[in-house]
Image (cartoon, rainbow, N blue to C red):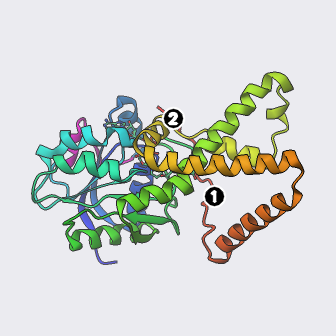
Amino acid sequence: MSGPVYERVALIGLGLIASSMFWAMKRGGLAGEVTGFAKSEGSRETARRIGLCDRVCDSAAEAVEGADLVVLCVPVGAMGAVAEEIAPALKSGATVTDVGSVKRHVIDVVAPHLPEGVHFVPAHPLAGTEHSGPESGFAELFDNRWSLLVPVEGSDPKAVARLRTLWEGMGANVDEMDADHHDLVLAVTSHAPHLIAYTMVGVADDLRRVTDSEVIKYSAAGFRDFTRIAASDPTMWRDVFLTNKDATLEILGRFTEELFALQRAIRTGDGEHLHQYFTRTRAIRRGIIEAGQDTAAPNFGRGGGSE
Ligand SMILES: NC(=O)c1ccc[n+]([C@@H]2O[C@H](COP(=O)([O-])OP(=O)(O)OC[C@H]3O[C@@H](n4cnc5c(N)ncnc54)[C@H](O)[C@@H]3O)[C@@H](O)[C@H]2O)c1
Ligand SMILES: O=C(O)C(=O)C[C@]1(C(=O)O)C=C[C@@H](O)C=C1
């Protein structure tokens, strides 16, 4: 690649995704100077200590001054307030993007604050871990994972293409998607599964008293996977469910219907129903593997705690 994709990049929020972006941009020589800001003073101090960002600023406005690309890497519920705060300091011609797990809400609360002459290209990398904070990121997080761009009406095609180049440079495969479709798809593939994992671990925790800690001691692989997911950041996930309410409730409604059908099959001894169901779901897993989509990154994270 000849030269950086952006001369100046500002990362607002310095957690898992921002720090992974920083290390991936450095790995690929994709950005000139990278500035950063996080609300928590502790995170800013940690960032300075570990060399996360070329310059850590004490306000979001200072961080975005002169930036060609501003990336909002804060929980979805904080996106609107951050956009309002940085709007007066944005350079004309700059691109603002975000990495939020929900897209319609982010567009609704960010777009109205952005001045004319600033491009808005929302995005969402489909990659993460259960860890959070500035020390949890790693350059390989986005390698061979999807990053979805969700251009809004009137998004400048050149700004979209440049952001695509950045994500590809960070190792991701890039696709474009409409915001409502994105939110429905992610409700199925990410949001509802997280809620189910939270619930299952909560049930096991309730049962712990009955089973005298054996649930933890003898936890099998399937349950361990649930506990990893259920260790994800509480602020991030609270915001996801509050801002992707309709799609998540739609999917949970369907989930409950299927669960009841399986429950009934178990109660009535309907082995045929269970066998057919599990045969269908096994085929889905095999389809994912055959399509080369089982790209779950190994957990390189350094396990930074939540703030
Ligand atoms: N963790 C994942 O698996 C994952 C994957 C893809 C996308 N996302 C999305 O990326 C975004 C960031 O997630 P993360 O996992 O990096 O979170 P994180 O908890 O690791 O980091 C969040 C950062 O935002 C900062 N912050 C919070 N409120 C702020 C505010 N008002 N102003 C400035 N800074 C603020 C925190 O100090 C912290 O540095 C979220 O919108 C999330 O939905 C997360
Ligand atoms: O691997 C994990 O820990 C994740 O949950 C990552 C995951 C996902 O559901 O796949 C979580 C939320 C995001 O918005 C994108 C990716």
Q: Residue at x 15, y 45 (%)?
A: 87
Which class describes the residues within 10 Å of circle 1: few (<14), some (14-19), or many (20+)? few
Q: Which residue is mark 1?
A: 298
Element type at mark 2: helix
Q: Quadrant of the N terminus?
A: bottom left
Q: Is residue 4 visible?
A: no
> Who's the residue at 31% across and 58% down the image?
122
Q: Amino acid at mark 2?
A: Pro
Task: Choose mark 1 or mark 2, whichever is in front.
Answer: 2
- In x, y percent, where is residue 190? 54, 53
> Which label was assigned to residue 233?
none
- Kindly identify the residue that appears in the image at 73 percent across and 44 percent down: 224
Q: Is residue 273 left or right of residue 70?
A: right
The answer to which of marks 1 and 2 sits earlier in the sequence is 2
Label 2: which residue? Answer: 234
Q: Nearer the viewer, residue 219 or 102?
A: 102
| Magenta residues, start to end | 52-64
**Three-letter amino acid code at the position of disc 1:** Pro
